[in-house]
Amino acid sequence: MTATDEVLPRPGGPRMLVVDDEPMICELITDVAMGVGFVVQSASTAEEIDVLLGSDFDVTVLDLALVGSDGIAAMRTLAARSPGARVVLASGASERIIASATRVAQMYGLQVLGTVTKPLGLPSLRALLRECKDAVLRPIASGRRRPDVWTIIDDLLPSQLHVLYQPIANVADGAVRSAEALVRWRHPEHGLIPPSEFVPALERQGRSHELLIHVAEQVAVDRMSVPGVADLEDVSINVSALDLNVSETPDVLTQILCKAAPAEAWTLEITETVADGTAVTALDVMTRLGLARFKLAIDDYGTGSSTLERLRWYPFTTLKIDRSFVSASPVQNLNDWIIVENAVSLGHQLGLSVVAEGVETSLVFERLRGLGVDKIQGHLVSEPVPALELAARSLRWSTTRVTGMALY
């Protein structure tokens, strides 16, 4: 099963696999897990791990330092055998190594429910495993089956895709003059399915260009017909890295978008993780988009590879700092905020506008303002809303910042 399947009640409780090459550690975690209601199997030898890893378990506790291999290799195997599986990472390594391993797991599509540091602390381990059990059982309480997106992706019809808009606010004066268009899939039976699930599935099927065209057409219509969208100076849409391999992309976007507004009134957000091996084609397409006068944003800055190389050659005009770096309090993760500070400085030195995504609290907003961020985006300003609601949400935020009133 995958982590997106409905978790049905099992005799005795949800199932956990404990993977650790130290049998005593396996036994300790097993005892605690059974105490909170899991049915547990463990694997401590290479043969046991190979047989059990990726089988029908609701949660896998994975040691990062397996003898003769390592937890990262096991992580790859788990992701291949059970996409989206839930994991708890265990390690005696430094916090930075654990943080790196957590990010690797997330990039492989695994759901990291938590981390356990060695030597094990029983109270914290017991609390974490209780949270894991709650996470497994929570879909049952909702009363609705959450499908594996790979089994329903062929059901997707253009009419089921809806575009929402998230305001982007200027830090200096609080004004909202731009917004990002975000696509959502409302399945007739299964309800709202997040883009983090269905967009990769469409990309795997080679349908990303189809999605881009549909979103561009819908946003162009909104910009011509809905005052809250038409009044904006700039609207951003997301472009998959795969669309940078399509030589017709600049012509297609020019034809669709420029009917509604000139090219310089559009920002195309390109994820930082442009696929390896496509650099020449990507640079070709992005240069032509720049020549057409579209603005180009490097999206999710800090989450991909070869960042400096892309900033060196690609004609970006905007740098968007990924939400993972600003979602925590400035005092909670100093390393992240050092990266944010340097990203702002680098962006400005390169002549780029810097936008911080995922801003949810006034404390984070004030810190970003102090660092010189140009614009912010996130639930502090507004969650993504339908086109008809955009003007009211934008006005509420702008008024709140001018008057100094608390929004929440």
Image (cartoon, rainbow, N blue to C red):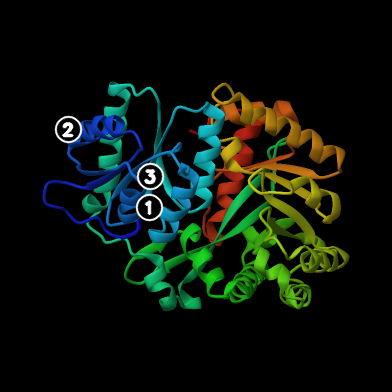
The reply to whether callout 3 and callout 1 are in contact (CB within 8 Å) is yes
Q: Residue at x 66, y 55 (%)?
A: 273
Q: Residue at x 59, y 29 (%)?
A: 364
> In the drawing, does residue 358 fall left or right of residue 312?
left
Name the spot of residue 164 as percent of width and height, x first.
54, 60
Name the spot of residue 217 as percent of width and height, x first.
64, 74
What residue is disc 3 on?
Answer: 87
Q: Residue at x 32, y 32 (%)?
A: 128
What residue is disc 2 on?
Answer: 35
Name the spot of residue 161 as percent of width and height, x first.
49, 70
* 2 or 3: tag closer to the N-terminus: 2
What amino acid does circle 2 point to? Gly
Secondary structure under badge 1? loop
The image shows residue 223, relative to residue 21, as above or below, that is below
> In the drawing, does residue 34 fall left or right of residue 193?
left
Identify the image quadrant of the N terminus. bottom left
Count neighbours of disc 1 (C-alpha within 10 A) and say few if under 14, some if 14 to 19, many if 20 or more.
many
Secondary structure under badge 3? strand
Name the spot of residue 12 as percent of width and height, x first.
12, 46
What amino acid does circle 3 point to? Val
Tag shown at residue 355: none
What amino acid does circle 1 point to? Ala
Q: Nearer the viewer, residue 387 or 282?
A: 282
Count neighbours of disc 3 (C-alpha within 10 A) and say few if under 14, some if 14 to 19, many if 20 or more.
many
Count neighbours of disc 2 (C-alpha within 10 A) and say few if under 14, some if 14 to 19, many if 20 or more.
few
* 2 or 1: tag closer to the N-terminus: 2
What residue is disc 1 on?
Answer: 85
Secondary structure under badge 2? helix
> In the drawing, does residue 161 fall left or right of residue 326?
left
